[in-house]
Amino acid sequence: MDTTKSFETPEAKLHFLDYWRIIRVRKTVILAVFLLVAITTTLVTFILPPTYASTARISVQKDATDIQSLGGAPTYSGFDPYWVQTEFEKIQSKVILYEVITNLDLNRKWGEKFKEGDLRTDITYKLLRRQIDVSQSRNTSLIEVKAFSEDASEAAVIANQIAEVYRKSRLRKWDEMTGKGVLAFEIELTNRMVAITNLQRDVDRLREELGITEVEATAGNILAGDVDSDTLRKLAVGFVEAQANYELLAKQYEGVTNCGRAELKRIISTVAPDNLLNTFLEQLAILETRLVNMTNNYAPNHPDVRGIRDQIAVLNGQIDERLDGVVRGLGVNLASKKAFRDTLRSQLESGKTNDVAQKNARRPYMQKNRELESAQNVWEKLYMKVVQEKTDASLPRSGLVEIFDQAEPDLRPVKPNKVLNITLGVIVGLAVGIGLAFFIEYLDTSVKTIDDVERALQAPVLGVIPQNVGYLIAEGPDSPHAEAYRVLRTNILFSLKDPKLNTITVVSGGAGEGKSTTIFNLATVFAQNGSRVLVVDSDLRRPSIHKILKVSNSIGLTNYLLKQNTLEEVIQTTPLATLDVMPSGKLPSSSMGVLSSAQMKELIRELKRRYDYVFFDSPPIMGVSDASILSSEVDAVMQVIQYRRYPQPMTIRAKQMIEKVGGNLLGIVLNNINMASDENYYYYSGYYYDYYSKNEESNPDKPSSGKDARQDGPGVEIKPKY
């Protein structure tokens, strides 16, 4: 049955003290790397030859003249970083530096310097390019040309020569570009003059052929025919008006001719007002009103009624005659409008025909005349441009490139900067050392702190054992190391709680983690406290308890389990009266599984009855099955983990194996802790050490413990107990 427990691993949070702990622990690595980098930097700094620097400062502008040009347009529009960067590259180009190399004869000088004869120009260029630096002066538009050399005078000469060659190159380039531009303009100006002469000849010929007078040519009325444009315009306007009047009158005439007599009487006054007709209509309305009134009062044949009817009949006849006259008048007026419209149309069409014919005849002259005028305008502009460019070319351009500061030999070398290099070496060495220390710490997955144990194994830490711990049986009860084991004993007692649980074994994941020393010193502390204690060396592969006590290992646990000796014969006494030991004895090759026998279980029950506490040493649990067997048979198990020795997965696996076999894991013992380098563990033992040392100072007559006490004290012979 798998008894492995699953725990949720808490999140690890690093504190500043954790970083300080890593630095303290890895201080040797940090110091070694720091010294290596710092010393190497210092040696290289003092070995490097001194390098001097000289700087020439120049001002550059975009195509600028000393005075405003003839065109009056601005020649410099402000600071342009891209243009300045382009000039940086031009200064360092082969065009400039090759000329510098030739002027200073650097091929020969540097060839003699390097003992190579005359160098090739391309090689000298590469060397020179590495020895110069072109940059922008801070917070200005000035360019700094800086040259480096082991000779201060040579650095100044190179910087000044580069600035001067660049200045001359800019001026020469400007003169070449201006000269080529003016020449191109003059050639184009000559070609244009030839074209103008030819056009003028054609214009004069056409004017004579077409009979164009000087006045017409000067006035620009060449395309006007017999009818001028104003007359044509007036004819067109008159024709439009006549057409509109005719159409309006035609609609009115059509309306009055198509309607009835009664309707005509109503609308005639609107279409063609007539005073006499209006009078007749008013009289007719009066008579009709009187007739209606009399009809109501008199009989139809009454003389007065008949008289009014006769008057109405006469008046209607007059109205009809007048209406006919008005309608005939409208017809005559319509015919007159039509005739006028037709006359205007004929005049307009005739004028247009004559005008088009006149224009077509004179159009070639007009086209040639326009070409001549256009060519003359272009020639005048070209002529002004040539005059402007020639004038601008003659203007001084000292501001195009101006050398403000000449380079001078420097008194002190700029390289190597000893203070800066050594300071950087110290800083870099310290940074690399600390970085390497943290990298090594990152790669180190071993157990380092109590938090590592509790986070990875989910088990309590019962005790912390410092480095270089001796055997307490030799150092005595006043040993400064004993306090760590007393703390461990106390934690074990609180963890056991039941006095019947008195058989304990100590296991570890790998070899050399100090489990034998731990179990023996723990047993010694229990024995010094008055308990009857037995230490059983059950590490049958590599027994060590007999070496600690310097006793014989000829008989022991294996002899008892193989029933070769009795229990009394295999148990031996120690200088401590309450502490007994059972060596491992010799293990025959045919009895490798002796610890899993029934005899072993019987032995454990017998020892529980005879002793207050029985401690079993064991082999590493990862390599031998004996440790797993012991863990399942004893009452309690402790796991020893050596500080910074094995990776955490190994210790976790060891704990899981204990739990799988049903072992009662009390907790973890951290062993071999370096108290001096790791302050996190100081509080486990520091107080006791301080107290102990002060106690020793206050009692100088008290005999010391440890090796001296063991050597000066009476020797005690270790012999079998029974």
Image (cartoon, helix red, strand yellow):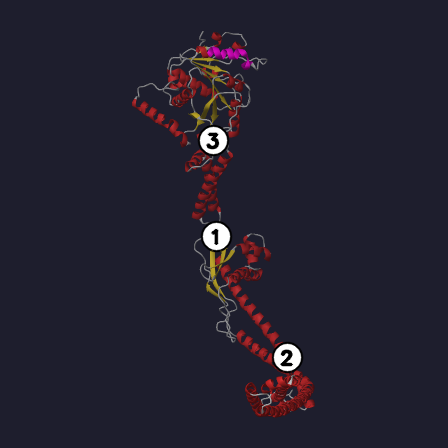
Q: Which one is nearer the viewer's eye here, 97 or 121?
A: 97
Task: Give me the C-alpha separation between circle 2 and circle 1.
Answer: 63 Å
As shown in the figure, which amino acid type bears the numbered disc 3?
A: Arg
Q: Write the start and end of the magenta stretch as one range.
A: 594-607
| Residue under the point 62% across and 80% down | 374
Q: Position of residue 190 (x, y in %)?
A: 63, 79
* Residue named by callout 1: 51
Q: Earlier in the sequence, mark 2 or mark 1?
A: 1
648 on left or right of 333: left
Looking at the image, can residue 226 be seen?
A: no
Does residue 208 belong to the magenta stretch?
A: no
Task: Give me the C-alpha separation between circle 2 and circle 3.
Answer: 97 Å
* Element carrying mark 1: loop
* Residue named by callout 2: 192
Q: Which one is nearer the viewer's eye here, 485 or 267?
A: 267
Q: Position of residue 409 (x, y in %)?
A: 45, 58
Query: Residue 486 is drawn in which quadrant?
Result: top left
Mark 2 or 1: in front is: 2
Q: How many neighbours does mark 1 have within 10 angstroms: few (below 14), some (14-19), or many (20 or more)?
A: some
Which quarter of the image is occupied by the N terminus? Answer: top right
Does residue 600 belong to the magenta stretch?
A: yes
Q: Which one is nearer the viewer's eye here, 407 or 422?
A: 422
Which quarter of the image is occupied by the C terminus? Answer: top left
Please tell me whether the stretch drawn in magenta is mainly helix, strand or loop.
Answer: helix
* Residue named by callout 3: 455
* Element carrying mark 3: helix
Task: Give me the C-alpha separation between circle 1 and circle 3.
Answer: 58 Å
Query: CB of mark 2 within 8 Å of CB of mark 1?
Result: no
